[in-house]
Amino acid sequence: MATTSSDDDAQKKSIRLNIPQRVMMIPATAFVLGTAIGLMRGGREASLRFLAENAHRPPTTVQGWYFYKKTKNYKVMLGALKGAGKDAGRVTVLALGYVGIEEGMERVGWGGMKSIGAAVGTALVFSAVCE
């Protein structure tokens, strides 16, 4: 199939974004890891909270134990999902900050120090936010 001049014009006018692959991979990996961490921490916290809130009135019947465990499981799942959302958001924002600072330093012309600058900048932001 021969190319025509209209095909060449369309290729010249098309917009192409050259986004480095690591700019997309680092935040995506951070999101997955943050979700896993949040699921574990949120579920454990919700489980301990439920046990503490209900320690003074344990069930006495088989039906009571069934509903106790059922309610606890639902509360643990909800707590795990909430924790996953919070931790995934926090870790992803930190990763986006790191990648953003690193790319900014690369574009300014400080490519040799971009990793160190991004690490120091991210540490400063983290310490300011998590006093």
Image (cartoon, rainbow, N blue to C red):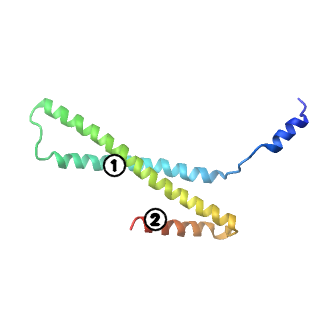
Looking at the image, residue 3 sits to the left or right of residue 102; the answer is: right
Left or right placement of residue 17 versus residue 131 in this view: right
Q: Answer above or below: position of 104 versus 29.
A: below
Label 2 sits on a secondary structure element that is: helix
What residue appears at the point 50 percent right and 58 percent down from the top-left corner? 94
The kind of residue tagged 2 is Phe
Q: Can you say whether 100 is above or below 37 in the image?
A: below
Question: Which of the marked residues, 2 or 1, is nearer the chain's N terminus?
Answer: 1
**What residue is disc 2 on?**
126
Instruction: Provide residue 104's location: percent of width, then percent of height.
Output: 64, 63
Circle 1 residues within 10 Å: few <14, some 14–19, many ≥20: many
Please provide percent x and percent y for residue 6. Answer: 87, 36
Q: Quadrant of the C terminus?
A: bottom left
Query: Looking at the image, is 59 positioned above or below residue 95?
Result: above
User: What is the C-alpha distance between the residues marked 2 and 1?
Assistant: 21 Å
Where is residue 113 drawn, in percent x and y?
Answer: 63, 70
Asked if residue 90 lies left or right of residue 43, the reply is: right
The residue positioned farthest toward the left in the image shown: 60
Between marks 2 and 1 in the image, the one whose residue lies nearer the viewer? 2
For mark 1, what is the residue? 42
Residue 11 image offset from top left, x and y in percent: 82, 41
- Which structural element holds mark 1? helix
Residue at image point 38% right, 46% down: 39
Image quarter where the N terminus lies is top right
Identify residue type, mark 1.
Gly
Checking the image for residue 97, the label placed there is none
Q: What is the quadrant of residue 129 in the picture?
A: bottom left
Q: Is residue 86 above or below residue 67?
A: below
Residue contact between numbered discs 2 and 1, judged by CB atoms under 8 Å: no
